[in-house]
Amino acid sequence: MEYMLKTVGLDKTVTTSEGQLTILKGIELEIKESESVAIAGASGSGKTTLLSLLAGLDVPSQGQVFLGPYELTAMNEEQRAKVRGELVGFVFQTFQLLASLTALENVMLPAELKGDARAEQQARDLLERVGLSHRSHHYPNQLSGGEQQRVAIARAFGSSAKVLFADEPTGNLDTATGLHIIDLMFSLNQEFGTTLVLVTHDQRLADRCNRAINIESGELVQGVD
Amino acid sequence: MHFMLALKLLWRDWRAGELTLLLASLVIAVGTVTTITLFVDRLQKALLQESATFLGADRVISSSSPIDTAWQVKASSLGLRQAQTLGFLSMVFSDDRAQFSSVKAVDENYPLRGQLIISEAPFVRGRPITHGPKSGEVWMESRLFPSLDVTTGDVLDIGVAGFPLTQVLVKEPDRGGGFESAAGPRVMMNLADVPVTEVVQPGSRLTYRYLFAGDEQALQDFERWIRPKLKVGDRWLGVRQGAQGIGNALDRAESFLLLGGLLGVVLAGVAIALAAQRYSLRHYDHVAILKTLGATPNGVDSIFVTILLVLGLVGTLLGSALGFVTQMGVVNILDSVIPIELPGPGFRGIWLGLITGFICLLSFALPPLLKLRATEPVRVIRRDIDTASVSDRLTYSFAIIGTLGLMYWYSGDYKLTLLIFSGAVVATIVLSIVAYLMLRSGRILGMQAGSSWRLALAGMQRRGRENTLQILVFGLAIMLLLILYLVRTALITEWQAQIPKDAPNHFALNISPQDVEPIEQLFKEKKIKAQPLFSMIRGRVSKVNGESARERKISSWRQRQSEGGKGGGGPGIDSSRNLTWATKLPSQNDVIEGSWWEENYSGPTLVSVEESFAQRGDINIGDELVFTIQGQTLTALVSSIRSVAWDNMQPNFYIIFSPGGLADFPATFMTSFFLDKTNKLFLNQLLRQYPTMTVIEVDAVIEQIQSIIENVTLAIELVLVLILVSGALVLLASIQASMDERFREHAILRTLGAGQRLVLGSLFIEFCVLGVFAGLLATFGAEITVYALETQIFDLKYELNPVLWVIGPLTGMVLIGVVGVAATFKVVKTAPSTVLRESI
């Protein structure tokens, strides 16, 4: 298989109080295995929506999405969830850690959901890798923004994901911390050989990727390698 | 599948305080139901046992002839204990005096319930004893001693036999409601001694009473078997028919306690629903994250159902333990006040509590949690995604079915269930409409953060939907509390009015006309509170509209039997009874048909007839009754039918003549008076001075009734307290549900410069205004529901409560204002940065 991700004729329209709103139109996209792609565009261009469709978090109004060997658009939510558990990792702008779980427990979650007996050991290794083993028993509200994002990154790789989706991962961080996070993400990415798709305004992040694609008013504009 | 994960999340949520309110609501719900059921069960059993002492048994067959021995064999085969008594009227003689008396011969098993009280001397406190006189001795009521001028040890002649008077009979359990004993003072002897007296001859008027006691199921089986076999004139008496004065009180108390339990269940259900709703709302984001990590909808279900089941198990067990301990504590506290021995707690209460807990969880907590499975994972990126895609209709259906089911199961009374439920539905609709109207009155622009008032009002309008719900919940909780309070007050007022503390507790009969003035003077001198004297004549109805009264009685009895009626309580219309005349309608008598005569009436003789008497004889307004009085006949027309409060232990009459109606007949007089325990020896003086007078002591009976009523009142107040706790929890849950949004809003306000005083002031105003509205609407709902309850269930007279329309809104304002601010005080105390950081 040449591609990890593929879309065919992807449309997304939503109904608002003012009528139908087209967010994405005719998106045709292919992303290869182990490729890193940045999706860029102005606010409201539809890049986050595209990310959520690629990750199977949402369903398009029209078109098809293929993730690995699976056609996401032909699946129900139960099946999509299983695919996410098997293939996908996420890093969000707002970290999205569970407040009632410690750093270690948050990282353990994906493996626990799969019933993996090695969940705890794996999680400890990952926290060590991101430099937070000494904070493993702390709760998210006891960690700084950068530390929370590192935990989120550790969690994303904890599911042995083939594809990592990141939505503005440095959006809530200061410049210096953001740089650290970028370095961490890419080094782990290389180590695990994952395909990386990220939405970003951060030019430094976009520059680190193999390719950048632009979305303008819901339509794909050819990217730059 | 995700059992360990579920347990971990449960534990973490518990540590974070996410589950406190839900668990507390569940524990209180189960605890309330368990406490009430256990306590009520025990009290009911005890009251029934106590009430059975009025009969001396659980059931009695009363007949004018011996019953078929096969009946006694049947009773034995069902495991019932039996006793027998024989009653007849006879002269009894001392050395130089004679008295007409009511003799009761009892066997060695008598009484089956309750105790007799005997003493060595008349009119002193006695000691309890569980059997009657042995063969060869007799006991006698206190008042006969001065009348016959005898003391204990002297011999009393009954018929041709003489017996030593060994004890004074102070109290026998089944003496009856006082006025029936006007037939004669009591002499008690052993049943085996009756033949030697030769008093009982063919044609003697005798009352055979066969007493039964035992297991309730066996008694009911026996009743079913025996009813078709009863003859005309046979009476089957259970506790309620036999227990004059308390039957009604017991019925009402049971209904009230059930009502309390019902309301407790409803309130608890609301609290659980609110707490579960909040828990669910706070977990949408968590579930969205779990879904991005691979949790399937079924997986989400299994996690939260596991959480619910574990919580349910812990909550119901804790609640049952709490209920058991609370109930034991209450019993201990009330031990000195409740004079009756409470039987041990049964398992029914525990089971009821456990099952209630799980039904509450399933009906109220499960639906909000099931919504979580439909959380869209894209919510992690787009917070604007709506959450409630599992139908709200399903949620409400679960809740309604669960509520109705629990209410009916708990009360076993569909009428009560429907009344309460309808009241709540009507209140809900009205509350919603009014709240909607309030919000429609122009949307205020902006946050209006310039003053606490404007901030509060603008906030209320903005949070329209949530505020409607809050008014609804507050209103419902206050309404249920008001209902309970109103009904309780009405019941207690009615009971106290029936038998006030200084109600006359002695009757004096057979007062000759020439003794009336001296006796009135004596009462005045001794400062004894006495009622005005009534004249009294013995007579009986011989004809009704030309038909023999006896024939009428029989045909009426047959008709009632064929209609499957349980009627037959009460003496036959042709029996001899006390007749009187009156100018005014006596107190606690109400004319229900026809009309009472004028005070100065002097026309043809009229009579006013009591309603059950009229029913037994099929007597109507305008009917002609012929009376046989002292060998002569007297005709009178029925001009009114009255209802009489027989429970009030006052002289009451089945038949009252118009003024002058009985002028041709020599009458004696009667009165009732109040005598304190310490003054009992006055009766010695009274009876020695006026030996022809009969005095009936009902003080012991009245005391017993009052004590039972007081105990029941206590139980009712306990229920009220428990329900108040449930209600407070509901208020708290409802306020908590709105906390998150208030936190965020006010944190932002404070970062923009709003002071703590402004924010606190606006919170206080908002809750007070919500409270006033809720109180007003609750009062409206309560009045309607209480009207239905009082007239349909409790058989009380409904009266509007104007004061309530002030108290209701005031209570709402104070209660919700204070509780609301106390619960949301954190909003002003928590640093805005903490709130804002945690909400990211």
Image (cartoon, helix red, strand yellow):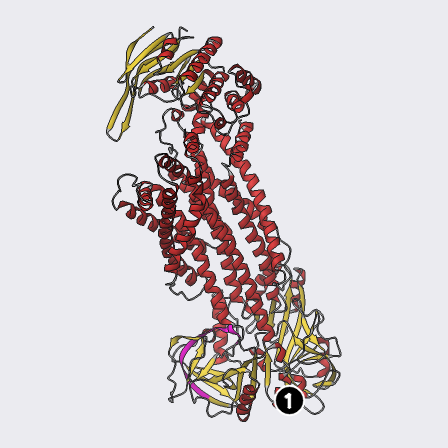
* Disc 1 residue type (three-letter): Arg
Q: Position of residue B788 (x, y in %)?
A: 40, 59
The picture places residue B329, in percent across and down from the top left corner, at 61, 54
Q: Quick one: label 1, few (<14), some, or many (20+) residues within 10 Å?
A: some
Q: Magenta stretch? A: B634-649
In this view, A34 is above or below B224:
above
Q: x, y (%) of residue B501?
A: 54, 73
Q: Is residue B635 magenta?
A: yes
Q: Quadrant of the C terminus of chain B?
A: top left
Q: Is residue B4 magenta?
A: no
Q: Which residue is mark 1?
A: B688
Residue B443 visible here: yes
Relative image position of residue B233 (x, y in whole percent): 55, 74
Q: Residue at x 47, y 77 (%)?
A: B552
Q: Nearer the viewer, residue B712 or A144?
A: A144
Does residue B238 appear in this view?
no
Closer to us: B530 or B67: B530
Q: Is residue B776 above or below residue B567?
A: above
Compared across the picture, whether B791 is left or right of B678 comes to left
In the image, A61 versus B832, the foreground residue is B832
Quadrant housing residue B331: bottom right
